[in-house]
Image (tube, rainbow, N blue to C red):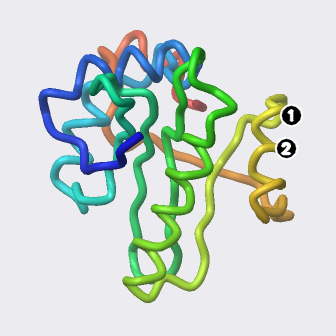
Amino acid sequence: MRIRAFVPADTEAVVALWEEAGLTRPWNDPHRDIARKATVQPELFLVAEDAEGRIVGSVMAGYEGHRGWMNYLAAAQDARGLGIGRALVERVERELHARGCPKVSLQVRSGNARVIDFYEHLGYAVDDVVSLGKRLIPDLPADAAAGNARR
């Protein structure tokens, strides 16, 4: 396995990976998320390739000076248990640490116990916080986004 920076030619494989992993939602356009990431710290958008060059993992990360964030960590279904997720997290941690980042945070949907266990095994702990969000730019037409404004 090789970890490298995302390139635009990876887009469809990464979106398919995210869909397979259950990370996409109807109110978030993954293509727009990728395009947005390309404009902000694109070197922190990483993919993992297997020996044949197939994309088997991904993670987006960023650091705004206070803390780092990880998003879209995914490993291909048929490659889980091979250490891909761990390797991507460790790489992000090194990249963020090299930038002076004191803490990395992430969000996991509350019902996803398997993923919470994965992160806890890597030393992450549940923070006693409530995550709030407000969409500034809808990914959907206004009429569809209105019903999903809270997401």
Q: Quadrant of the C terminus?
A: top right
Residue pictured at 50% horizontal, 46% vertical: 71
Residue 144: percent from left, percent from top:
42, 11
Provide the residue designation for mark 1: 113
Q: Secondary structure at mark 2?
A: helix
| Relative side of 137 to 42, left or right | right
- Res. 78 image quadrant: top right
Residue 129: percent from left, percent from top:
79, 61
Tell me whether the residue at label 1 lies in contact with that at label 2, contact meaning CB atoms closer than 8 angstroms. yes
Residue 52: percent from left, percent from top:
30, 23
Q: Amino acid at mark 2?
A: Asp
How packed mark 2 is, by other alpha carbons closer than 10 Å (few <14, some 14-19, many 20 or more), is few
Residue pictured at 69% horizontal, 32% vertical: 81
Residue pictured at 16% horizontal, 53% vertical: 39
How packed mark 1 is, by other alpha carbons closer than 10 Å (few <14, some 14-19, many 20 or more), is few
Q: Nearer the viewer, residue 74 or 38?
A: 74
Residue 129 sits above or below residue 32 on the image: below
Provide the residue designation for mark 2: 117
Residue pictured at 60% horizontal, 31% vertical: 150
Q: Nearer the viewer, residue 94 or 54?
A: 54
